[in-house]
Image (tube, rainbow, N blue to C red):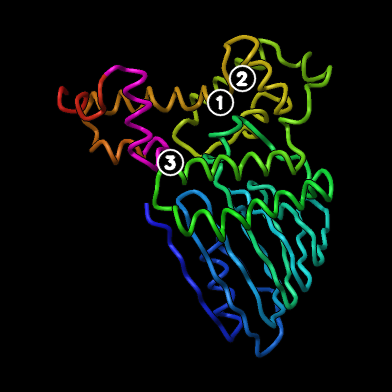
Amino acid sequence: MQPVEQVVEVTDLDAANELLSAAYGPMRLNGGIEHPRMRMSSQVHDQVRFDEVRGHIGLEVAVDPMRSYVFGHTDSGMVYYGSGGEDRFWLPGDAFLCAPPDSPFVGAIRDPGLSTVTLTQSVVDEVADDVSFSGFRPVSPEAGAVWWSTCVHLRDEVLPLFGDNPLVRANANHLLVSATLAAFPNTTLTPPTSADRRDAHPASLRRAIAFIEDNAATDISAADIARAARVSIRASQLAFRRHLGTTPMAYLRAVRLSCAHADLKAGKGSVTSIAARWGYARPSVFAAQYRATYGVSPSRTLRSC
């Protein structure tokens, strides 16, 4: 897939709000300075997006849940995010996670030199299943600096030259996610507590499985599954590993694949439409996982119905 590159300049608040909404999801403009100037350059590489926002602008917005992880680095100006009752101000040199992907938040920028890296949940899951970030700052200034240098290297040198090569793009994505997991606090760095081990019992597993099977057609996360099971994310992960030898998100993918198999056998659409219905944005990934599970291609199953 060819990378998508775009540079846009705007000179009024409504245009700035529209541009940011297109990149990050619906926003509601709360206020801003008159006569702004903002330049936004973007690179989109399938499931990874890089943006740079610069200019003379003051903007305050309220943002719906983005359903993706947006990390940032501030070169100049000031950036503010607030979610879950916590206010966070980022100054030049700071690296940060702006907000949890399932939480609404408020934000503001003032004369920013701001770079962001957006990762979809699926590209994170390819490296670490059921991960949840537990902090907004890097684990150390050194870790933040290494993470940002990795982002810049991939954004400015590797992906512009080789982003149309699937193998290079996949390896770049894995390196980017791995560097992010190493730099920011998350559940892969935190061992289960004694309470997590105690809660990882069959009853919580049954509640989680029932929730997954009832909601497989909807956009649910590891956090949603844990809430339905009435335990922490780590306890939910531990219950699935202890009793089923898998993870909550892997179990969800297996349920969705089974549902897709049933739809193919019943002829309920094309391979592409059925794959999309059950959460597969890339038909090639769906086809590979389907063949590995059922021993035949999706198209062959569909033709035999």
Crowd tier of the residue under label 3, counting other residues whose Cα lies within 10 Å: few below 14, some 14–19, many 20 or above: few
Give the SS element for disc 2: helix
Q: Which residues are magenta?
A: 277-295
Q: Is residue 223 above or below residue 42?
A: above
Mark 2 in CB contact with mark 3 (< 8 angstroms):
no
- Badge 2 crowding class, 10 Å Cα cut-off, few under 14, some 14 to 19, many 20 or more, is some
Q: How many marks?
A: 3
Q: Main secondary structure of the magenta part?
A: helix
Vertical position of residue 288 compared to residue 4: above or below = above
Q: Nearer the viewer, mark 3 or mark 1?
A: 3
Q: Residue beneath label 1, please?
A: 211
SS of the residue under disc 3: helix
Q: 129 or 195: nearer the eye?
A: 129
Point out residue 165 in the picture as x, y percentages from the top left corner: 40, 48
> What's the residue at 23%, 23% (across, down)?
265
**Is residue 291 one of those drawn in magenta?**
yes
Q: Determine whether label 2 and label 1 are within 8 Å by CB.
A: yes
Alpha carbon distance from label 3 to label 1: 36 Å
Quickly name the residue at label 2: 207
Compare marks 3 and 1 and give the one earlier in the sequence.
Answer: 3
Query: What is the secondary structure assignment of the residue under circle 1?
Result: helix
Image check: 210 left or right of 33?
A: left
Amino acid at circle 3? Leu
Measuring 65% from the left and 64% from the top, which residue is drawn there?
115
The residue that disc 3 covers is 167
- Left or right? Give the position of 153 relative to 294: right
Q: Nearer the viewer, residue 170 or 197?
A: 170
Where residue 140 sits: x, y (%)?
84, 46
Disc 1 residue type?
Answer: Phe
Name the image quarter holding the C terminus.
Answer: top left
